[in-house]
Amino acid sequence: MIGPFWSSRLGIDLGTANTLVYVDGRGVAVKEPSRVTVSASTGEIAAAGSEAEAGAGRTPLKFRTVRPIRHGMICDITLCEGMLTRFLRQTRIGGPLRRSRVAIAIPGELTEVERLAIVESLRDVGALNVLLVDQVLAAAQGAGLPISEPRGRMVVDVGAGVTDIAVISLANTVETRTIKVAGDEMDAAIAAYVRKKHQLLIGERTAERIKIQVGSALPVTGHLSVRVKGRCLIHGIPREVALSDGEIREALAAPVHQIVMAIREVLEQAPPELSADLVETGILLTGGSALLRNLDQRISQELGLPVAVAADPLSSVILGLAHQLRHLRNRDWRRFGRSS
């Protein structure tokens, strides 16, 4: 049955860690983890979103919890469709995307084949029109940057699966790079460190909790510590250890360095006039992993530019998509060629 949002306009931030859906005229209607729990025997979805995340690492063998999105790309179209269907039912929108015009944010360096795959997958679940929006441009707009000005600005969107870096001017990306180093890589680095240093096996959710509670890119004021439980690799039994912020900073050194170096490479390729603008306009950090303690200070220290974190880094992209939807006219959708 088609719900009350027949032929509605939707903005979708289909992130590796979280999915947000904006309904024009209603606001952000969905904010859920991008996870599904499926039956190992039938492949049917048993749970999605926060319900699936709650069971991650704790499900019996007949179920498995997976992410349909990896590194900003749909890696399982069927599961992604099922996940979106469940999310939209929560908002009483109706069938998955039936008769809707959809604006979706994508990483900047996707190939034409990958872009086409996203368009076709959304059309397959009933979208009337699909508009692909550069993720960094959406994040910049959602964070309130005046991107239409003829002035250089840099945005670094540090998500879970990818870090999108771009120099922007006149509402276009002038120089851009996407790297598959972000929050997930940080979590993996923490898990590897704990395994090697403490001979303790921990799950990805525990690694993420450690990052949030004590993770940092530069030394913090005071002393932070966290107690962590896992399986001892030597004796095979549960064990608990205490981890300090210094240890986790050491664990995060490699992924943080890779992000900083990628930003430096984009700066080196930017036109000189725009580079000059960045001395004043600086760098804006968005995305959930931009909340890592002192990441802004680390980047500023190494690159010599002012760095600020967006007021709501987790919602910058979806707010930018909302702005796009509010200002697009009907003929604008037809103007976008094969993506419309």
Image (cartoon, rainbow, N blue to C red):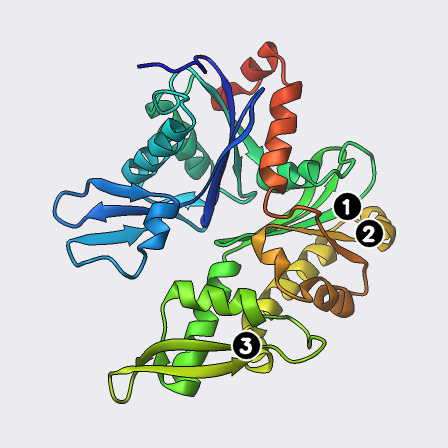
Q: Single out the mark in the foreground, 3 or 1.
A: 3
Residue 310 horizontal/vertical position (percent): 70, 48
Task: Kindly identify the amino acid type of the residue bearing the numbered disc 2.
Answer: Leu
Based on the displayed image, in which of its 4 quarters is residue 163 positioned? bottom right
The CA distance from mark 1 to mark 2 is: 6 Å
Q: Nearer the viewer, residue 273 or 137?
A: 137
Q: Residue at x 65, y 80 (%)?
A: 223
Q: What residue is disc 1 on?
A: 153
141 lies left or right of 200: right
Identity, as a three-letter code, of the amino acid under mark 1: Arg
Picture quadrant of residue 82: top left
Asked if the residues shown at circle 1 and circle 2 are in contact, with their CB atoms under 8 angstroms apart, the answer is yes
Disc 2 and disc 3: Cα gap in Å?
A: 31 Å
Looking at the image, residue 293 lies above or below residue 107: below
Residue on which disc 3 sits: 248
Assign a secondary structure to mark 2: helix
Q: Work out whether mark 2 precedes mark 3 in sequence or the reverse, and give the earlier one.
A: 3
Bin the neighbour count of mark 3 within 10 Å (Cα to Cα): few under 14, some 14-19, many 20 and up: many
Label 3 residue SS? helix
Kindly identify the amino acid type of the residue bearing the numbered disc 3: Ile
In this figure, which residue is indicated by the disc labeled 2? 278
Residue 197 position in % (x across, y down): 43, 86
| Element at label 1 | strand
Instruction: Say few, some or many: other residues with alpha carbon within 10 Å of mark 2 (under 14 / 14 to 19 / 20 or more).
Output: some
Q: Earlier in the sequence, mark 1 or mark 2?
A: 1
